[in-house]
Amino acid sequence: MPSPTLPLLAALLLISPVLAGQPIYKVEDEHGNVTYTDQKPSEHAEPIDLPDLHPVGDSDAELADLLAGQAAEEAVPALELVISRPAEGDRVSHPAGQVDVEIDSNIEIPAAAQIVMILNDEPQAPVRQLSMTLAGLEPGSHRLRAELQTPSGRRLATTEEIRFVLQSDPPSDLDQ
């Protein structure tokens, strides 16, 4: 008596190419919702073209290594922010208590991003440029860092904290 498994296996082998090439239809309803189906939705429906898939397997290890190397070369560099002015330890002289601040970045800052200066642990009003003037500072030692943020306040990058001294009178020849 023949095994029932053999005819079943033969039938599956004969049907599998038909199933693999089965057309897929895209259906869009009146609300714009899209559905994909293997059932022909109407008599005039045309199947959509699907791209051939060629997954990279263990036999294509060299191709996988090449693609991985290419992806690493195209990677975007990490965002770096640096306060370039005033520099760490600078003595800044301004009778009205103002300090000009400049920030440098290794990549272009997105237009929607904002910069928040944090002076002595107090966040200042956000700005959208890399140079600004902090006003109304008292003479003495100050700590400053900057954060690049999204409009919703999510931090994208931050600078190292710098320290500077604000002098209300011009520096003398001994300070230079």
Image: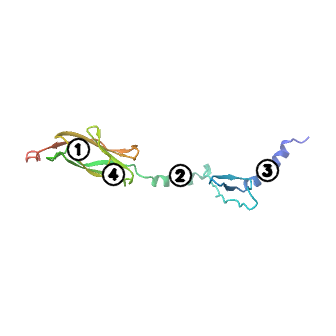
Dot 4 corresponds to which residue?
A: 128
Q: Tell me: 34 left or right of 9.
A: left
Please, what is the three-letter code of the amino acid marked with disc 2?
Answer: Asp
Residue on which the image places disc 3:
13
Across and down, in percent, residue 136 comes to 20, 44
Q: Residues within 10 Å of mark 3 (few under 14, many from 20)?
A: few
User: Of circles 2 and 3, which is in front?
Assistant: 3
Task: Inspect the image, locate mark 1, and give the three-letter code of the amino acid beneath it.
Answer: Glu
Residue beneath disc 2 = 65
CA distance for labels 3 and 1:
74 Å
Q: How far is the residue under mark 1 from the one under mark 2?
A: 44 Å
Q: CA distance from mark 2 to mark 3?
A: 35 Å
3 or 4: mark nearer the eye: 4
> What residue sits right under mark 1 in the picture?
88
Q: Residue at x 43, y 52 (%)?
A: 76
Q: What residue is drawn where x is 53% and y is 52%?
A: 65
Q: Quadrant of the N terminus?
A: top right
Mark closer to the chain start, 1 or 4: 1
